[in-house]
Amino acid sequence: MSFSADSTSPNPFHMCNICQKVIRKKEKGVRVPRPFSSGPSAFIPKEEIVEASQVDPLTEQLLAEAYSPLGHVDHLTQVMGLHPHYLESFLHSQFYLLRMDGPLPLHCRHYIAIMAAARHQCSFLVSLHVREFYRMGVCLDWLKGLQYIPQRLRNLNEINKLLAHRPWLITKEHIQNLVKTGEHSWSLAELVHAVVILAHFHALASFVFGSGINPQVDTQNANGFQAVYISNYCTCDLASDHHLDRDLSSTSPETTDSVSELEALMDRMKRLQQEREEDEASQEEMATRFEKEKKESLLVGSGDLEDEVMPTSKVSQFVEDATFGYQDFARRGEDNPPTFRAQDYSWEDHGFSLVNRLYSDIGLLLDDKFRTACDLTYYNMASHEDVDTTMLRRALFNYVHCMYGIRYDDYDYGEVNQLLERSLKVYIKTVTCYPERTTRRMYDSYWRQFRHSEKVHVNLLLMEARIQAELLYALRAITRYMT
């Protein structure tokens, strides 16, 4: 079993774009100290989180007792607390998923959460559930790595990596392999429970990285530094994020002034609303616009990072086939999977009833969380008040689904191109598809006049869109297996 990236390459060297130094490609990372930022988030000032949070102290204490294995409200909960209505729905769903009656034993649930978070090297979430494992004191050998866990759990590795990186590849044969494996077989109820946990923690890793959630302070790390591995970077790059933000260097002229950027977005929203009322696009035109947006998403994001070695990770013992990662749904010059048409299999008409039937009540909790994130609004945009942001929220949600090959026949994908600037698309694709590559510069590059709480709302929408996309592919495969 190998956890390292493939080292084969026609040219083992490349030139640094910054200092022009020639350096070796894909050599083992070097360990460098990096200071912890203060507060729950590396992206959001601590004072803004404290001032904006509407979670009262009593509620915080109840959350700590009911949810956090740390005995206090963790950094993730503090940042999510910028939107208390959503936080309540999120915690109800997660608490039910991990601690209430269900098909899977409690320790297995936490281990599946570890396996899911490790796909994106999310040490924040892995550490959280490793602590929970120690608290339960059950099967502690499992924490040494995947080779120490039962074969039945190891059999989840395939569907874990597909869900995390290319969910459109999941077929009914994958489901059959899990439920018909003799002594290692899964019941459908157990499998649905596991799939929901996997999707939940894949997407939660996106939120953690997208919001710059800081690690919980390790009291043994007295110097206040964290050790990170830097691989394939030039030394001139260590403090600059140049290696991760090349796509952001070619911003359009209209993004140079953040105030005019906001006004331009407001104007586009008004114009699109008027066009909706005056002339509705035909089904053929909307299908064409979807295909155009899907193909344009190929040009967005970390395309020049595909061959870059990922850093050596302290969670690698929980990962199998570590080099397997995201690939675009629509790849140039290849036979691509057919578009997933939401009218043929949707959450509302199909997924909800199936998941609720096999794992009682989780469908209701998931549905409430989806609706809460999508309907959440304070009727403002930056400094503007009394603004209907429905159009913008739907564009964000549907763009994620578009990247996953999911199309809504009643949605005009031309709106995505009008409302989401390139720097925002780069951020969305990175947070959704390879969240471990998210940087502060990416976060800062879009919507510069907006509040941090509004950007956190963006991350909530991306997280829920990703969960739903993964579940749609998995539940459709389960449905096909059952029929």
Image (tube, rainbow, N blue to C red):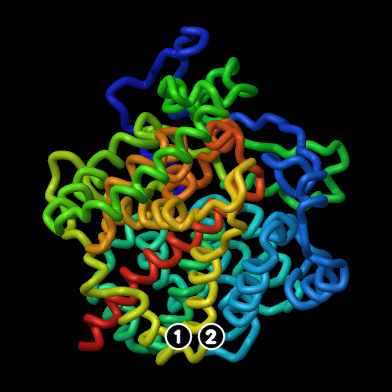
Q: Tell me, for residue 278, which label it has, or none.
A: none
Q: Residue visible at 43% across and 74% down?
A: 195
Tag 2: residue type?
A: Leu
From what the image shows, is residue 128 above or below residue 220?
A: below
State which quarter of the image contains the N terminus: bottom left
State which quarter of the image contains the C terminus: bottom left
Q: Position of residue 378 (x, y in %)?
A: 62, 58
Q: Position of residue 72 (x, y in %)?
A: 83, 65
Q: Residues within 10 Å of mark 1 (few under 14, many from 20)?
A: some
Residue 242 seen: yes
Q: Residue furthest top?
A: 20
Query: Mark 1 and mark 2: span between their CA atoms?
Result: 6 Å
From what the image shows, is residue 121 above or below residue 332?
A: below
From what the image shows, is residue 109 above or below residue 102?
A: above
Residue 327 seen: no
Which residue position holds label 2? 104
| Along the viewing direction, whichever of 343 and 178 lies nearer the viewer | 343
Q: Residue visible at 35% across and 40% down?
A: 418
